[in-house]
Amino acid sequence: MGQRTQYTPGTFIWTDLATSDQDAAKRFYGELFAWTADDMPVGDDGTVYSMMLRDGRPVAAISPQQQAQREAGVPPLWNSYISVESADASAARAAELGGTVHAPPFDVMDAGRMAVIADPQGAFFMIWEPGRHFGAALVNSPGALSWNELASPDPQASADFYAALFGWQLEAMEEMPMTYFVISNGDRRNGGITELPPGVPPHWLVYFATEEIDAGVAKVEELGGTKLSGPHDIGIAKFAVLADPQGASFALYAGELDD
């Protein structure tokens, strides 16, 4: 069980869902992953940021999608957060490397400081300078974040961008039928970069661990979600890509997990 109290900069530390129906999403993921919600008010209009807990530990969050995103036709989606020492310095460096800073660094009360960035290929991610909130207290365990994977139209260019920004080490998996880089941050594996499927925009996909893939997929469908692909057998694990009832994509992973 991967319990955490801090993270090395450059590590994926958190994910949150921006959705068109917060209450429905809380019910769906609550039943799927045995999550409970701790609703935290974030405005005078009654808006809440729902910290989702597994065994009492924060593992993710669910929030309402911003009106501007809805009007722009942005679908509900899971966001990937990467820990940094300085949000300001990292945002400036991302811009130097060809990324686009869509939301310049700003404080999230005393929880931390963040920015929203698109890499040169167009995939969005968040950088997070920890304050009171360091990230997920549980990872690499059933019902918790276990992997982050970038689908890119140019995996090598993406690998170069993120290596320069975060100091990641990237190892090409030669035995794979498509280009695939495994990301390491220091001595820990940290995710992957792969080729973009046809007809899909560049994106980071979040993986949640589950005990058994077929049962996990069946539960998603029982709760009103949709199977998009899989299950796929990669030897050390099986995974499937799914969508929740509001359309946000995520993956389930059953197999070997880092500690």
Image: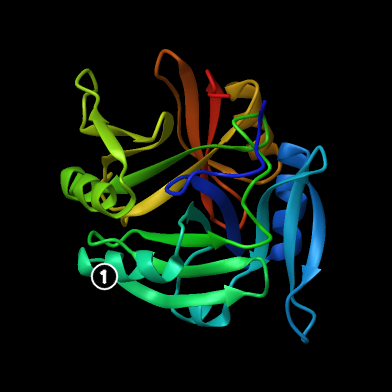
Query: Is residue 114 depicted above or below 210 in this figure?
Result: below
- Asked whether, in this view, residue 119 is left or right of residue 253, the answer is left
For image coordinates 23% across by 45% down, the residue present is 159
- Asked whether, in this view, residue 27 is left or right of residue 15, the answer is right
Quarter of the N terminus within the rendering:
top right
Residue 48 position, x and y percent, is 75, 71
Residue 132 position, x and y percent, is 68, 61
For image coordinates 39% across by 34% down, the residue present is 186
For image coordinates 42% across by 78% down, the residue present is 104
Quarter of the C terminus within the rendering:
top right
Q: Residue furthest bottom?
A: 44
Nearer-the-camera pick, 41 or 104: 104
Q: Is residue 150 visible?
A: yes
Residue 138 position, x and y percent, is 67, 38
- Asked which colour scheme the image uses, the reply is rainbow
Nearer-the-camera pick, 29 or 120: 120
Query: Is residue 44 depicted above or below 199 in this figure?
Result: below
Q: To which residue does mark 1 refer? A: 95
> Mark 1, residues whose alpha carbon is within 10 Å: few (<14), some, or many (≥20)?
some
Q: Secondary structure at mark 1?
A: helix
Examine the image and state in which quarter residue 220 appears: top right
Residue 10 position, x and y percent, is 42, 48
**Which residue type does callout 1 highlight?**
Ala
For image coordinates 23% across by 62% down, the residue present is 120
Q: Is residue 153 visible?
A: no
Nearer-the-camera pick, 76 or 173: 173
- Asked whether, in this view, residue 171 is left or right of residue 206, the answer is left
Could you tell me how many numbered marks the image carries?
1
Examine the image and state in which quarter residue 54 appears: top right
Q: Residue furthest top?
A: 235
